[in-house]
Amino acid sequence: MKIGITCYPSMGGSGIIATELGIILAERGHDVHFITSNLPFRIRKPLPNITFHQVEVNQYAVFQYPPYDISLSTKIASVIKEYDLDILHMHYAVPHAICGILGRQMSGKDVKIMTTLHGTDITVLGYDHSLKDAIKFGIENSDVVTSVSQSLAKQTQDIIGTKKEIIPIYNFVREIDFPTQRNEKLKELYGIASDEKVLIHVSNFRQVKRIDTILETFKKVHDKIPSKLLLLGDGPELMEMKRLARDLGVLDDVLFLGKQEFVNQFYQMSDLVLLLSEKESFGLTLLEAMKTGVVPIGSTAGGIKEVIKHKETGFVVDIGDSERASQYAIQLLTDEALYAEMRENMLADIAERFNSDFIADQYEYYYKQMLEE
Ligand code: GMT
């Protein structure tokens, strides 16, 4: 099949999933065309059947807001025509689903469109009245719509008010990128003593991530157990969270490490991964850490409770409940047998439910189904 893929190419879960899926499809022999503003950052090696088509945005002085959406649609139309695409796979509803439909119309070809919803395109932007109808249009005019969790599928129908079928297909990790292994030596490199436990959180530091709850949880753990908290990522909450860490008296033991490319290495020195968000359609960071072998504690938000099986592969707590999160963390960090049992369950569950080939098969199945219609 000849497949065009559009996503946000910079760091972020939706871009990672779109790129990794494209790589798997290319490895399976499909012709993959990324139509994006920049080269997706996970493409690090030459792959013969992957082509990158850069969207160039006109910066003409009259434009207060350069028309990325129009340029993207035009590029999509030209790639459809030049390469005779069969499928367009648009990741994230805004503006990509809508641009896919416009691009198809401009091309005059009958290319099939799959849209994958990732999270805030529905749970945040779906409440914005300047966008809601456009999102609905994008969803209802796509041939197949998928979401990264069952929770997001349900929320989409409720928030957007559509009866369109939304098919949940979970995210996945490329096994090769996140080998299950520990690397104690890295702790030394970051000045972490060998007897200290390591907690990790990776995000874009927005309010929905509730890093305040992460810090409050860490404070309670730190009071009982020698430990460090690794915070990876950057975003609007960063300065405020540094202030909070100082107020809680844990600043010296919280390592603000900024954006990092090789997150897998940080997971390899971690004992627990925390994701206590207030909205989270899936939480790809959990899966990456879990595949590495790190046991998770998440919140009940969105799809997190589909990723973590409570008391079986990790723990889930109510949003904002740092007390309960710290109790579970202390339990896991002090009871080796419990930790080992959960880790084993977790690795087995990931291999079964979030296996990259198993997930790619599902996308391929719906591609074929669209073409047969
Ligand atoms: O919607 C966002 O916050 C950005 C988006 C992204 O591009 O990383 O994150 C969403 O998509 C990820 C990949 O499917 C999911 O793992 C994240 O849970 C989801 N974020 C939220 O729902 C807040």
Image (cartoon, rainbow, N blue to C red):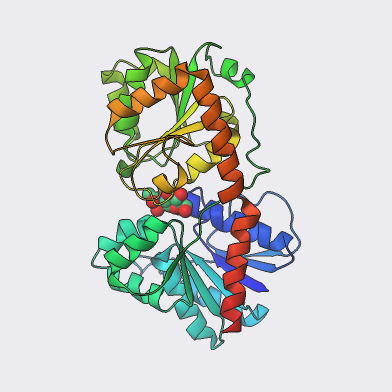
Q: Is residue 86 above or below residue 147?
A: below
* Residue 107 on image: x %, y %: 54, 85
Residue pictured at 63% horizontal, 18% vertical:
185
Camera-nearest residue between 59 and 42: 42
Q: Position of residue 11 (x, y in %)?
A: 51, 47
Q: Position of residue 242 (x, y in %)?
A: 33, 26
Image quarter of the C terminus: bottom right
Question: Residue at 33% across / 48% down in the picture?
Answer: 279
- Considering every residue shown, the one lying at the far left of the view is 129
Asked if residue 138 is positioned above or below residue 202 in the image, the reply reads below
In terms of image quadrants, where is residue 331?
Answer: top left
Residue at 41% from the left image edge and 67% from the top image edge: 95
- State the quadrant of the N terminus: bottom right
Q: Is residue 78 left or right of residue 102?
A: right
Q: Position of residue 282 (x, y in %)?
A: 43, 49
Please tell me in which quadrant of the rendered image residue 320 appears: top left
| Whether residue 241 is visible | no
* Residue ID at (49%, 13%): 196
Residue farthest along the bottom direction in this orientation: 108
Is 77 left, or right, of 82 in this rendering? left
Mark yes or no: residue 257 visible. yes
Q: Is residue 27 above or below residue 164?
A: above
Tell whether 327 sits left or right of 99: left
Q: Nearer the viewer, residue 71 or 363?
A: 363
- How many numbered tags mark residues here? 0
